[in-house]
Image (tube, rainbow, N blue to C red):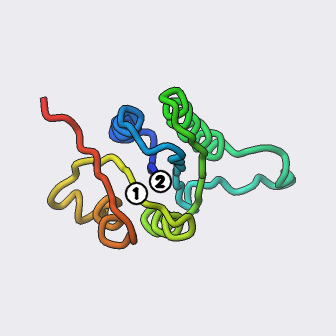
Amino acid sequence: MRIVIAVDDSRHSERATRFVAGLRWPAGSRVIVANVTGAADAKPLEAGRRANSGPSDSAREQERIVRRAQDELRAAGLSAESRPLRGDVRDELVKLVEAERVDLVVLGSHGRTGLSKLLMGSVASHVVTHAPCSVLVVKEEVP
C-alpha cells in the first residue's frame, strides 16, 4: 500500500502522524511524508551569494518537519521516505498522489470553519475532492 501523509509544523500534523504510526498496515506498505512550502516562502538569494552555498532557512525548516514525522513512522516499523515540495500545497499534494499512484492520503484537519475556511481555503477539502484515491482526514480529539 502506498500512503502519503501531508505534514506541516502543527499539532494537527503530529496527530495525523501518530494516527498512521499507531495503525497496522499491510506488509510492504510505503509511506511518503510530504511537506509543501509555497514559492513565496523561499527566500531570494542575497547579492553575491552562490546558489549552492547551502540550504536556506525555509529548506532547513522543511527538512526538520518531514524528518520528525519520518522518524516517528520508522520507529513504528513503517518504511518511510520524505518528499519536500514547493508550490501551492493543494495542487502539489494532488500531483504527488497522481505521480506516485498512491492508495491513501492522510492529513490532519486544522478544523477551520465559516469565514476562516472560506478565506484560508481548505487543503483537506481540496484533496478529498481532487485526489484519485481515498483520503483520511484526522481530526483533533474533542476534550
Judged from the image, the secondary structure of the residue bearing numbered disc 1 is strand
User: Which residue appears at 54% of the width and 50% of the height?
Assistant: 32
Judged from the image, the secondary structure of the residue bearing numbered disc 2 is loop
In depth, the one of 83 and 103 nearer the eye is 103
Image position of 55 (left or right of 2): right
Q: Quadrant of residue 66?
A: top right
Mark 2, other Cα within 10 Å: few <14 / some 14–19 / many ≥20? few
Tag of residue 130: none
Tell me the quarter of the image containing the C terminus. top left
Q: Position of residue 139 (x, y in %)?
A: 24, 44
Q: Mark 2: which amino acid?
A: Met
Q: Earlier in the sequence, mark 1 or mark 2?
A: 2
**Marks 1/2: CA distance?**
8 Å
Give the labeled residue for mark 2: 1
In depth, the one of 131 and 79 nearer the eye is 79
In depth, the one of 89 and 58 nearer the eye is 89
User: Which residue appears at 36% of the width and 50% of the height?
Assistant: 107
Give the labeled residue for mark 1: 104
Q: Position of residue 13 (x, y in %)?
A: 39, 41
